[in-house]
């Protein structure tokens, strides 16, 4: 690793993280599009991109470890590099969710997606991911707080989906398999929001030193 100022290395790693987040959100959006339009042809590409994202996350982690070994950062610089590693891992987990969504593709009709308002829910979750990374780049506590607040909205939307699906399952002509897969998509979108919230909480710690406990997920609703 070249002998350059620590802040230059941190800027480069931050930019790599921003680029990774953009690709993660784009691939997740492609996955939802594939489900909505039953676009099976795009599935191999989505899976290929996810494999690439996984390798990029590994590369970021290795660069961070090398940075710590060679530069011996302390205090805030050390917290920053550890935050980059944590955020990179959260982004990779978000990327994996795109594969879970496409796995549910064939069982869900576009009409069901529209009924359950998945696009709106997804848009909100994706916005959380973008804002969480922006909060990191800008060191913006208020923006990080906004992400955490949005997480509650996504949770509420997931609960609404759960209630709708439960009601539909009680009908005589219920397509149970489709409804189970729809619930899985809703849960996976909620997981995107959860991971974005964790990134935002890491930003809050980085900026203020305040540890914000991530609230529990709602697996008991599934």
Image (cartoon, grey):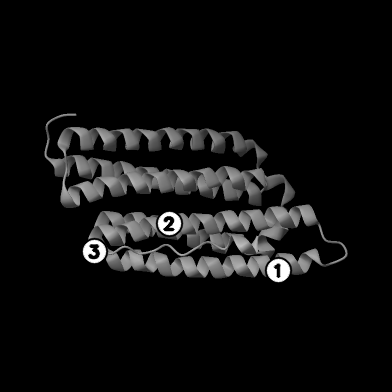
Q: Kindly identify the residue that appears in the image at 30 percent across and 62 percent down.
A: 204
Residue 2 in the figure: left or right of residue 22:
left
Is there CB contact under 8 Å for labels 3 and 1?
Answer: no
Q: Select label 2 or label 3 by which is in front.
A: 3
Res. 164 mark: 1
- Check disc 2: other Cα within 10 Å, few if <14, some if 14-19, many if 20+: many
Location of mark 3 (residue) = 208
Residue 120 in the figure: left or right of residue 166:
left
Q: Residue 156: horizontal and vertical position, in percent?
A: 56, 70
Location of mark 2 (residue) = 196
Q: Quadrant of residue 167?
A: bottom right
Q: Looking at the image, is 150 positioned above or below residue 182?
A: below
Q: Select label 3 or label 1 by which is in front.
A: 3
- Check disc 1: other Cα within 10 Å, few if <14, some if 14-19, many if 20+: some
Q: Is residue 186 visible?
A: yes
Q: How far apart, in angstroms, are the residues tagged by discs 1 and 2?
A: 25 Å
Q: Kindly identify the residue that appears in the image at 53 percent across and 61 percent down.
A: 217
Is there CB contact under 8 Å for labels 2 and 3?
Answer: no
Q: Looking at the image, is 9 positioned above or below residue 134?
A: above
Q: Looking at the image, is 72 positioned above or below residue 21?
A: above
Q: Quadrant of residue 115?
A: bottom right
Q: How far apart, in angstroms, are the residues tagged by discs 2 and 3?
A: 18 Å
């Amino acid at each position: 690793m070249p002998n350059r100022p620590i802040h230059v290395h941190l800027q480069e790693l931050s930019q790599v993280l921003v680029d990774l987040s953009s690709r993660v959100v784009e691939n997740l959006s492609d996955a939802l599009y594939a489900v909505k339009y039953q676009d099976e042809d795009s599935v191999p590409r989505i899976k290929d991109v996810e494999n690439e994202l996984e390798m990029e996350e590994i590369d970021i982690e290795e660069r961070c470890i090398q940075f710590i070994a060679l530069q011996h950062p302390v205090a805030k610089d050390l917290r920053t590099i550890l935050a980059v590693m944590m955020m990179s891992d959260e982004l990779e987990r978000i990327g994996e969710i795109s594969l879970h969504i496409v796995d549910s593709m064939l069982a869900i009709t576009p009409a069901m997606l529209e009924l359950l308002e998945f696009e709106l829910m997804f848009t909100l979750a994706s916005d959380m991911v973008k804002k969480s990374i922006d909060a990191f780049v800008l060191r913006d506590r208020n923006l990080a707080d906004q992400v955490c607040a949005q997480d509650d909205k996504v949770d509420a939307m997931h609960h609404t989906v759960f209630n709708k699906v439960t009601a539909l399952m009680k009908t005589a002509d219920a397509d149970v398999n489709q409804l189970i897969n729809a619930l899985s998509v809703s849960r996976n979108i909620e997981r995107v929001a959860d991971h974005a919230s964790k990134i935002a909480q890491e930003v809050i710690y980085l900026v203020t030193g305040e540890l914000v406990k991530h609230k529990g997920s709602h697996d008991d609703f599934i």
